[in-house]
Amino acid sequence: MDFRWTEEQELLAQSLAELLQREAPESLMAELDEQKEFPYNSWQALADNGILGLGIPEEYGGTPADILTLTLACEILGKYAFPLGIIYSLGIITIRDILQFGSDAIKAEVLSGFVRGDLPVALGITEPQAGSDAAALKTTAEFDGDDVVFNGQKMYSTLAEISRYILLMTRDPSKENPYQSISMWLVPADTPGLRFNRLSKVGWWTVPTYEVFIDNARVPRKNLVGQLNYGWPQLMANFEIERLALCAASVGAAEGAYEDAAAYANRRSQFGQPIGSFQAVQHKITDMAIKIENMRNYIYKIAWMMDNELPVRHEHAMCKLYVAQAAFEVTDDAMQLLGGLGYMTTQRVQRLWRDVRLMRIGGGTDEIMYNIAGPQLLKKARK
Ligand SMILES: Cc1cc2nc3c(=O)[nH]c(=O)nc-3n(C[C@H](O)[C@H](O)[C@H](O)COP(=O)(O)OP(=O)(O)OC[C@H]3O[C@@H](n4cnc5c(N)ncnc54)[C@H](O)[C@@H]3O)c2cc1C
């Protein structure tokens, strides 16, 4: 087993870290967080330096990249500028759905735009009554000549108002099986009939999330992505990679929090000596480092399995469950090690602590990850 990166991957990691320190420094991330503003210039810098094109075919202006390399990019983004890691990871599912299932016209429009710096296509699955049970969604799509007309409501749609497009999931109420009655549509965010309410959140302040009210919003029929009533399997096709990307960004965030805590443990003195000289502090630092190592090994193993087309059905859920919890524990320990200072909004650790907490809920909750993994593990044990 070879744990080394290739020369290209080393170069990517180094140049991306340098880019982020220049174009998305911590001072800017802190300022935008406080102002609850989207990091437009930093996002554009990612596009200008080819990062958004990673994994997108050359015909749309991208550069081929395997999942291992995309995972590495997410980890670096998460470490140096976590909001960019979140935005990029969220975009992976919609961008890959469009790449896999979109018409040629949709692909040319959306993928080329993304590579040039458009925000990711927002995702509209969740509804007030359909959260973990996402297939219980009710938003409808009715054909009217060459158009389709949408009605319903979406919840927690991140980036929906500021992206150019929303990937909207609808359901045909006349069909009984929800998994065979969901469709996927590309809907411009400025379509008349869409109304947005920005939600107030504990974290992710630079990355806005909305309620979306949909009242007779009309788009051409050709905006269907993939096949009618095949939206559910299409969506599932890229959920695993989205979860992996979110995990990778979270590992990066945990590394950032760890570094802040370790530096502080060496710098801060109490009782006449650096707090790092106390065994209790050394133990915490060691536990944090072990969790980071475990998380990194887990995400790269899943990435490697995906690149080798091995199934990751329960493995990816176990990885998401472990990483979401361990990354939060590391940011929480970092806050503890900084003492009162850690609770001050001047510190990066409090922001990471708020931001990383969502990973146990978004992209599928901890409990749903158990529900995916548990039955599969038992099935395997029966064989
Ligand atoms: C900041 C943020 C951003 C988001 N971004 C998007 C987005 O861009 N697009 C989008 O479509 N959605 C988005 N979501 C929605 C997110 O995916 C859901 O919040 C998540 O799937 C949980 O759904 P819910 O909030 O309705 O909770 P519920 O499903 O109501 O769950 C409530 C609790 O019950 C538990 N529970 C539910 N069912 C079971 C079960 N069968 N077994 C055990 N426990 C169970 C859950 O684990 C949870 O603890 C976002 C959410 C947030 C908070």
Image (cartoon, rainbow, N blue to C red):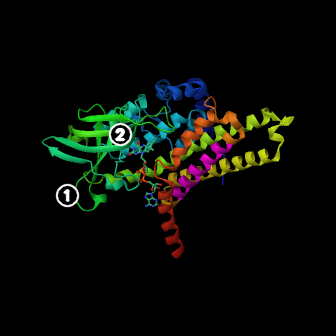
For image coordinates 60% across by 28% down, the residue present is 26
Residue 383 in sight from this viewpoint:
no
Cα separation between marks 1 and 2? 26 Å
Residue 74 location, x and y as percent? 54, 40
* Magenta-highlighted residues: 315-333
For image coordinates 78% across by 32% down, the residue present is 267
Q: For the residue labelled by badge 1, is the local secondary structure a helix, a strand or a loop?
A: loop
Q: Which mark is residue 174?
A: 1
Closer-to-camera residue (110/287)? 287
Residue 217 location, x and y as percent? 22, 38
In this view, the residue farthest toward the right is 272
Mark in the foreground, 1 or 2? 2
- Give the residue type that dot 1 points to: Ser
Residue 174 location, x and y as percent? 19, 58
Q: Which residue is mark 2?
A: 211
Classed neighbour count for the residue bearing mark 1: other residues with Cα under 10 Å, few (<14), some (14–19), many (≥20):
few
